[in-house]
Image: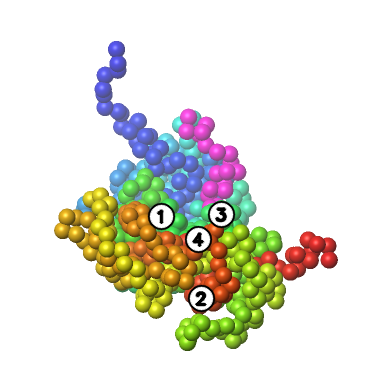
Amino acid sequence: MPNSIKKLSKEISILIAAGEVIERPVSVIKELVENSIDADSRIIIIEIEKGGFNFISVSDNGRGIDSAEIKLAFERHATSKIENKEDIYEVKSLGFRGEALSAINAVSEVECISREKNSNDATKISFSFGKFIKHETVGSNYGTKIFVRNLFKNMPARYKFLSSEKSEKSKIIQFLNEISLTHTNISFELIIDGRRKYKTDGNNSIISIMDTIYNLKHNGFIKLNEQNDNFEIDGILSNPDNCFGNRSRMKVSINGRVVKNSSIYFTIENSYKPFIEHRRFPIISVDIKIPHKIVDVNVHPQKYEVKFLSEHDLLSFIYTSISKILNNNVPPKSIPIKTNQETIYQNYTDLVHEQMSFGNEESLSLKKTLPILRFVGQIKQLFIVCEGPDGIYLVDQHAAHERILFEQFQKQKIEKAFQMITINNYYDLGVTSNNKIIENIEKFHELGWDIDSSPSGGIIVRNIPYQKLYKTKSTDITELLQMISRDLEKKQIDTPKEIISKRLACHNAVRAGQKLSEIESKKLLIDLENTEVPWDPHGRPAVIKIKYDYLLKEFGR
């Protein structure tokens, strides 16, 4: 017979809830440190022994707890930060649910000493695995000290599945790194097994904290501060030379709360993509200020995960802000991809061209400050080969042309750069795809398409732009429109116009395997030189350089 349904005891309910909030020693430290921050502390000292299993203490110089309320603070759902249901949807403090002290109390031996600034005495209260022990008056400095001992001693199953002391220490250090970078006005001190691990000054210098944590020189960072009507992003980024093989040095906070949000991390990585190697990750510490009413921090027991309204607008703002600061600050030099290659980025000052002009268009004139790059030929009908003063340059013809076309579409240089081809066909892509194209039909008009919706719900295409020089007119409009529709349906940080422009550029660009004449190749090189950034719209390099020094070494010369 199955067991009958019965209500759990209060003790078991508390232990289950505590297990959701307090997973490991770092969970205790996180909750206590956040309480200290909410109490306006300017000095927070954390001490641990044996990875936090034996002993944890968090001391601060904050407001302290009223002696009449200190016992209540350890009861479940007792909080000073929420008064009504509306407060849940506009949380401004780090803690708010009133679960932390109760959860810690349930799985450890706890002692709390607290004194308010206007009080002559401090109050001390003690618990043992949820049971009240003592309440007394003692002497102490103002602020709060909480001591936690024998964590999970009453939950051997939980203790058994935790990591080693070394691993738990690492998690604690990681959290303290993140929180000290987020709250630079607070001095944090970490003591491990009686020895100081590190201490921050609380002088609002994020760069000095970065230096302390990552041991990098000041010139390894770029300051970031951008804002619009809804968002502000502030912090520092590493330049592309200071990147690593994992994301552990990437820290993002929302309104002062450290969060883990895959969409934000993906957006940051996309911003860096043109500047760094594949699977390399920057050091970044940014705080993003957004209206409290459009962020939900109550979606995870430990408050690491958050959800946003207007997420697309936020991600677009982050991408634009970081891309702008990198473009403006990264030195105009080649960035290594492999030991023998360099990708040409930024102002493209390393790539140079034979001086030649086509027609009377000023936009095709070369920058006189550039050295000469001699066109050599095309190989595998994939790459244009050029000889430069310091190496051999290989240009990916499709990636280069894709970048050229993308910028021409974005800048609406349609009449100047393209000719029109007549289509005059009706297309039915299905209800969903038809509607997605029709929703964005004005964007197609801006990009030179003569396109309209049909009364029957389909699409009428009359004329489209193409470039005669490269013989790349599109004949399969159905496939192109379907791909654009799918792109528009995906969750992306690009605007609809950028999404359409990328697809049109890719579809119209010179193909791999397409033979180019010398004149066509040189024209493509000149057009590429006049782009803002010579990599394709997806962030892939359009040019690599093989240094002569490398070739001489390989040939033993």
Mark nearest the camera among 4 and 3 is: 4
Q: Give the labeled residue for mark 4.
A: 511
Tell me the kind of residue under disc 2: Asp
**Label 2, label 3: how far apart the Cα atoms are:** 30 Å
Which secondary structure, mark 1? helix
**Label 4, label 1: how far apart the Cα atoms are:** 32 Å
Which secondary structure, mark 4? loop
Asked whether the residues under the numbered discs 4 and 3 touch, taking CB atoms below 8 Å apart as contact, a structural biologist would say: no
Q: Earlier in the sequence, mark 4 or mark 2?
A: 4
The region drawn magenta spans 157-174
Mark nearest the camera among 1 and 2 is: 2
Query: Of residues 441 and 41, which is closer to you in this image?
Result: 441
Which residue is rendered at x = 30% and y = 47% of the image? 78
Q: Residues within 10 Å of mark 1 (few under 14, many from 20)?
A: some
Asked whether the residues under the numbered discs 1 and 2 touch, taking CB atoms below 8 Å apart as contact, a structural biologist would say: no
14 to 38, vertically: above or below: above
**Label 1, label 2: how far apart the Cα atoms are:** 34 Å
Query: Of residues 17 and 496, which is closer to you in this image?
Result: 496
Mark nearest the camera among 1 and 3 is: 3
Which residue is rendered at x = 70% and y = 74% of the image? 390
How many numbered marks, from 0 up?
Answer: 4
Residue 527: mark: 2
Q: Residue furthest top?
A: 1
